[in-house]
Image (tube, rainbow, N blue to C red):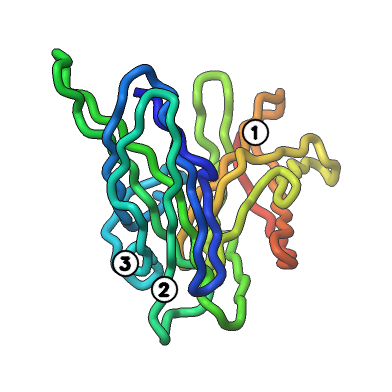
Amino acid sequence: VALTASPAHVALAGSGQATIRVTNSGTRSVLVDVAGAGFSLDLRGRPQISAPGGARAAGAWLTVRPRRLALGAGASSVLTVTARGPRRAERGDHDALVLLTTRPQQGLGLAVRMRIGVVVVVRAPGRIVRRLELRELRVRRAGRTRVLELLVVNRGNVTETLGRNRIDIALNRQGKVRARLRPTAREVRPRTSGIVQFPYRGALRGWVTARVRISAGGVGLQRSFRVRL
């Protein structure tokens, strides 16, 4: 089974509609069950399937048609995703997932299912709030690499993408910048916390001042930490 879906990420403004193309590029026909679910990221950014309800979950807002696909080898089909949020939905971004799950094929010795998810972000209308907090910076050793782990709290109502061009750490000693680190990019969902990782393979050892600078969505923020490499 080789199932793909495009796009892998769908953004809807309020009550909206989008299409997802599902393709079976395998050599056998396949039946696919389609369902909505909740979506979240854990502290280290790993995706998790969750219940469709909740304060910032939009799984219960989605209607997906059709609910089942029969795809021959090399065939494609289109899903229609419609979002209808409640009148008093909290402003900002709400996350959901469209789950595509294949059924075990008859006649095979091993029953195998394949599941893929398409992330759907529904932005409820209203004032956008961007507010990040830099809470803590720790150093973790992973073999010969030291990883600086920054705990970021998103107190706003939209998802913040923290990539190489939006956040960095300058390592200072005796008033001079000795190294500048860029992160492994990740997203931090509204009203959640996340760890942003900065690998360091340089020669610095001992105590340094790590100056964090962040610029995301018009939000500028700086904070310094004393850490031991």
Q: Is residue 84 above or below residue 165?
A: below
Viewer can see residue 157: no
Q: Where does residue 91 sit, x and y in percent of width and height?
A: 51, 78
Q: Quadrant of the C terminus?
A: top right
Q: Mark 2 is on which residue type?
A: Arg
Question: What's the residue at 69%, 47% (across, down)?
Answer: 210
Task: Give the mark toward the camera: 2 or 1.
Answer: 2
Neighbourhood count class around disc 1 (C-alpha, 10 Å): few under 14, some 14–19, many 20 upward: few
> Would you name the residue on which mark 3 appears?
60
Q: Where does residue 65 sit, x and y in percent of width and height?
A: 35, 56
Question: What's the residue at 70%, 52% (across, down)?
Answer: 212
Q: CA distance from mark 1 to mark 3?
A: 51 Å
Q: Nearer the viewer, residue 8 or 131?
A: 8
Looking at this view, name the residue that lies furthest to the right.
Answer: 176
Q: CA distance from mark 3 to mark 2?
A: 9 Å
Q: Mark 1 is on which residue type?
A: Gly
Q: CA distance from mark 2 to mark 1?
A: 54 Å
Q: Tag 3 or tag 1, which sits nearer the N-term?
A: 3
Task: Give the mark toward the camera: 1 or 3.
Answer: 3
Q: Is residue 122 above or below residue 143?
A: below
Q: Is residue 144 above or below residue 120?
A: above
Q: Tag 1 or tag 2, which sits nearer the N-term?
A: 2
Q: Secondary structure at mark 2?
A: loop
Q: Quadrant of the N terminus?
A: top left
Neighbourhood count class around disc 3 (C-alpha, 10 Å): few under 14, some 14–19, many 20 upward: some
Q: Quadrant of residue 89?
A: bottom left
Residue 206: numbered disc = 1
Q: Mark 3 is on which residue type?
A: Ala
Residue 84: numbered disc = 2
